Image (cartoon, rainbow, N blue to C red):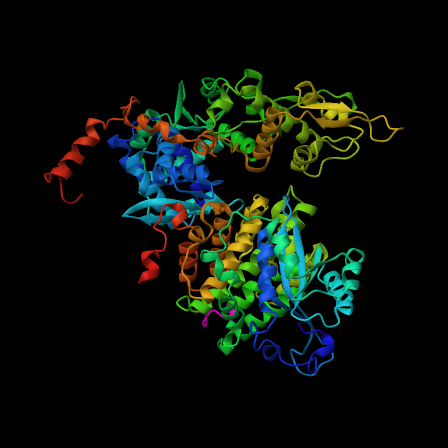
């Protein structure tokens, strides 16, 4: 796994595990991964803060908003310092402040992935990251983990127990076995996955979903992608449609968002719907542009974000009608007095801008980056966060991941000195 | 001030020309002008010298001293555009009228937004009548005092900042090059002369290149070397401010591309370099696509972005570098936080610390330069004890 992917997935793993009691002993085998994931969150929090001299406030916000336990805070800071993402000021035996060097353009995840690799993660951590990364691409049958992902057979049960208990891995069971999928994937009705696997086979399931992840806004036909087409028909995944040139039928453009931002999948679902509409329209322009096609769909999104409008085109009204109907665009008059085309103009609202940014992330990287930037916590850190201090003392009420007896007993034996000294 | 007409032979070695800097009798006037510029919110450099290279000369590098600028003030508009002020300071009023025309020409040459003729005694009446026509301010000691009164500053110029206006301290700073190691000659010449006549985009790489050339000589334990380092940081901060102007004017929506184009010398130059790289690669030389740009381009793009998003803090960045350079030359240890008190701009201090850190990394300087810069810039602003160096530097 390359460093970029490793850094990204460490954040995914930590995002999944952070809702559980951090003191739980079952999280010990993945502590390095969690540490790097926490570092990614904390780096995002301090990215725009040049200097921080109130470390208590930072620690409080990190604990309350990012679930970075106070006991791990210093270790996370040291990791960021080693990775040259912050510089710490030490006074009187402690850290009194920091200056942020979190890059704007160099890749944070590349740096953190390298830090993860440098810390010699355990085999279980490597396998967990591999599974999480695979699930980010496509669902997978649980009985093919060894063959497809390369997980050791002896680790499968432990891995699945940890993943499913922590809800980092979701599972649906059917006649043909269990299908695993990621909770960060925006499936409308995930229980349908096992039906699809049964009908089309688990290999087809993996290959078609991987193709979809690789090209968000995939133009789907029953012939080219039978499983995805079936999934759209059953309502498992979303696929806004756009009219093709020459009065032909509507073409669905399938999209499968992957995001850590759970609000986007629930409360902010209308924003996500708009993002999918954007993707469908610009992909249509790329593949079915009429007189001329878009050379790169991202250019159109960038133009809307930067200039607020697109150059008129003979296909503008057809191609961007869905975006107009969703309230993202309005059609202005042609710029030429004699012209009869429409000029697509952005309706400049925060929601529409966010939708365009999500669409751009999905087009460029295959997944939405929102939810990775510690957005809410950054606002909180800008305010006086000291009032939050009492929250640190509130006893954790989150579900606790307890060791299962089978694996806990040998651990106790080893700690107490009466277990086997050599395997 | 020396202009081309009075230069000895026009082809002398630059190092000979800089002898005795900071010892001239015009220095008190220059310091008065520096104080006025600081009240205006600017940073100021004294004795900026310009020269041009001679293409037909047999000796290399052969250059012709053009002229020098007694005081060059650098300020910024609220939007971050550079605002230059040039001042000609003399203790006599000899040929003042002719000098007014000369000042106008030099101001145009360096694209100064404002120009001043500063004199120690009252000037002939004709000079003042030419003032508005030529767009040149005339300042005698009475005018300077009156102007200073109209610009109250929140800063305490009587505390550690007094070093900037003290003749002995400033002479020590300006005279650093006289006793410097010969191996630092190229770096000093570059800062003294070439920085001001190179195309601005070249300075983004030339400061680093000249520092790289002096890596083995520069010693962070030496106050004079630290002063030189902070002078480099001042020049680099100005070069970045010029890059920021370019980015803002050309391609705000795509900062990395804009910075690459600027550093590469323009779109056409960048294409030419890419074509050259391909030819070199075809010829079996180790040139890949990355070799078109300097190896520190990613860090540089990040640094430019930090300046770009903080347009209101550029002036503070230059002023802190100027203070640190002069105070190091004078062997005075106060931090920026101590010197600027409650007016300290934390963001500007951080930007300068970032710039120093970048120069250390990109040029491969000894890391203690970075440690020292942090100690004087941000250590006490982030909860550290003022006046104490971090443990690493103490050892």
Q: State whether residue A423 appears in this view.
A: yes
Q: Where residue A153 appears, x then y in whole percent? A: 31, 36
In the image, taking residue A140 as reference, residue A419 lies left or right, namely: left
Q: Residue at x 14, y 44 (%)?
A: A421
Q: Residue at x 45, y 71 (%)?
A: B216
Residue most toward the right? A338
Q: State whether residue A148 appears in this view.
A: no
Q: Quadrant of residue A16?
A: top left
Where is the C terminus of chain A found, in terms of image quarters? top left
B369, above or below A38, in the image = below
User: Who is closer to the viewer here, A13 or A90?
Assistant: A90
Residue most toward the left? A418
Q: Residue at x 74, y 79 (%)?
A: B56
Q: Where residue A323 appears, x then y in whole percent? A: 68, 23
A16, above or below B349, in the image = above
Number of labels in the image equals 0
Q: Where residue B342 appears, x then y in whole percent? A: 46, 45
The answer to if B217 sits in the magenta stretch is yes
Q: Where residue A88 appears, x then y in whole percent? A: 37, 48
The answer to if B169 sits in the magenta stretch is no
- Start-end of magenta stretch: B212-218
In the image, taking residue A358 as reference, residue A409 lies left or right, namely: left
Q: Main secondary structure of the magenta part?
A: loop
B315, above or below A299, in the image = below
Q: Quadrant of residue A98?
A: top left
Q: Residue at x 42, y 45 (%)?
A: A112
User: Who is closer to the viewer here, A113 or A356?
Assistant: A356
A121, above or below B123, in the image = above
């Amino acid at each position: 796994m390359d460093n970029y992917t490793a850094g990204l997935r460490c954040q995914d793993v930590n995002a999944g595990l952070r809702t559980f009691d951090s003191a739980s002993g079952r999280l010990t085998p993945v502590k390095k991964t969690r540490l790097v994931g926490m570092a990614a969150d904390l780096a995002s929090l301090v990215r725009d803060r040049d200097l921080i001299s109130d470390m208590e406030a930072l620690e409080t916000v990190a604990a309350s908003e990012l679930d970075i336990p106070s006991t791990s805070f210093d270790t996370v800071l040291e990791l960021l310092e080693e990775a040259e993402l912050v510089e710490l000021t030490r006074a009187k035996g402690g850290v009194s402040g920091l200056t942020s060097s979190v890059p704007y353009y160099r890749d944070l995840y590349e740096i953190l992935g390298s830090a993860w690799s440098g810390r010699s993660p355990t085999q279980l951590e490597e396998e967990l990251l591999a599974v999480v990364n695979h699930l980010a691409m496509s669902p997978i049958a649980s009985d093919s983990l060894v063959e497809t992902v390369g997980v050791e057979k002896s680790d499968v049960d432990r891995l699945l127990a940890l993943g499913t208990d922590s809800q980092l891995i979701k599972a649906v069971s059917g006649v043909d076995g269990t299908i695993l999928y990621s909770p960060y994937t925006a499936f409308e009705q995930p229980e349908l996955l096992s039906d699809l696997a049964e009908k089309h086979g688990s290999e087809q399931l993996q290959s078609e979903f991987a193709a979809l992840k690789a090209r968000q806004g995939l133009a789907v036909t029953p012939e080219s992608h039978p499983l995805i087409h079936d999934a759209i028909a059953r309502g498992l995944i979303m696929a806004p449609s756009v009219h093709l040139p020459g009065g032909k039928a509507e073409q669905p453009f399938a999209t499968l968002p992957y995001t850590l931002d759970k609000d986007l999948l629930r409360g902010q679902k209308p924003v996500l719907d708009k993002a999918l509409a954007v993707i469908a329209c610009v992909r249509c322009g790329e593949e079915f542009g009429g007189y001329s096609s878009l050379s790169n769909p991202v250019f159109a999104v960038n133009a809307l974000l930067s200039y607020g409008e697109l150059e008129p085109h003979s296909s503008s009204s057809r191609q961007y009608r869905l975006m107009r109907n969703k309230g993202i665009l309005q059609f202005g008059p042609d710029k030429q007095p004699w012209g009869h085309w429409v000029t697509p103009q952005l309706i400049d609202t925060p929601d529409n801008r966010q939708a365009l940014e999500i669409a751009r992330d999905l087009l460029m990287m295959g997944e939405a980056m929102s939810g990775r930037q510690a957005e809410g916590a950054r606002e909180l850190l800008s305010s006086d966060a000291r009032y939050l201090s009492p929250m640190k003392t509130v006893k954790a009420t989150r579900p606790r991941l307890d060791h299962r007896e089978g694996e806990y007993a040998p651990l106790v034996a080893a700690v107490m000195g009466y277990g086997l000294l050599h395997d | 001030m020396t202009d081309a007409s009075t230069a000895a032979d026009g082809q002398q070695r630059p190092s000979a020309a800089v002898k005795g800097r900071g010892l001239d009798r015009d220095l008190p006037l220059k310091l008065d002008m520096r104080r006025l510029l600081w009240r205006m919110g600017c940073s100021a450099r004294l004795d900026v010298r310009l020269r041009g290279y001679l293409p037909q000369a047999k000796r290399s590098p052969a250059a012709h001293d053009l002229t020098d600028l007694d005081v060059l003030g650098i300020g910024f508009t609220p939007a971050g555009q550079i605002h230059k002020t040039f001042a000609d300071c003399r203790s006599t009023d000899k040929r003042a009228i002719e000098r007014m025309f000369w000042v106008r020409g030099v101001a145009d040459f360096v694209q100064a937004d404002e120009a001043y003729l500063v004199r120690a005694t009252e000037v002939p009446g004709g000079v003042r009548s030419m003032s508005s026509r030529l767009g040149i301010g005339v300042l005698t000691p009475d005018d300077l005092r009156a102007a200073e009164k109209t610009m109250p500053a929140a800063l305490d110029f009587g505390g550690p900042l007094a070093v900037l206006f003290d003749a002995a301290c400033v002479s020590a700073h300006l005279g650093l090059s006289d006793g410097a190691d010969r191996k630092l000659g190229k770096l000093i010449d570059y800062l003294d002369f070439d920085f001001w006549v190179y195309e601005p985009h070249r300075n983004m790489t030339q400061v680093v290149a000249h520092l790289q050339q002096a890596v083995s000589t520069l010693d962070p334990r030496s106050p004079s070397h630290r002063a030189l380092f902070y002078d480099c940081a001042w020049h680099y901060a100005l070069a970045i401010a010029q890059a920021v102007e370019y980015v803002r004017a050309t391609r705000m929506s795509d900062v990395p591309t804009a910075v690459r184009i600027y550093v590469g010398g323009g779109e056409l130059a960048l294409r030419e370099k890419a074509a050259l790289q391909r030819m070199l690669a075809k010829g079996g030389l180790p040139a890949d696509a990355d070799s078109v740009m300097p190896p520190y381009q990613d860090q540089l793009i990040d640094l430019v972005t930090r300046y770009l998003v903080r347009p209101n803090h550029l002036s503070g960045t230059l002023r802190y570098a100027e203070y640190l350079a002069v105070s190091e030359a004078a062997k005075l240890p106060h931090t920026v936080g101590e010197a600027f008190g409650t007016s300290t701009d934390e963001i500007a201090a951080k930007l300068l610390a970032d710039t120093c850190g970048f120069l250390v990394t990109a040029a491969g300087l000894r890391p203690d330069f970075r440690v020292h810069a942090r100690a004087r810039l941000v250590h006490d602003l982030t909860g550290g004890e003022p006046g104490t160096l971090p443990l690493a530097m103490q050892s």
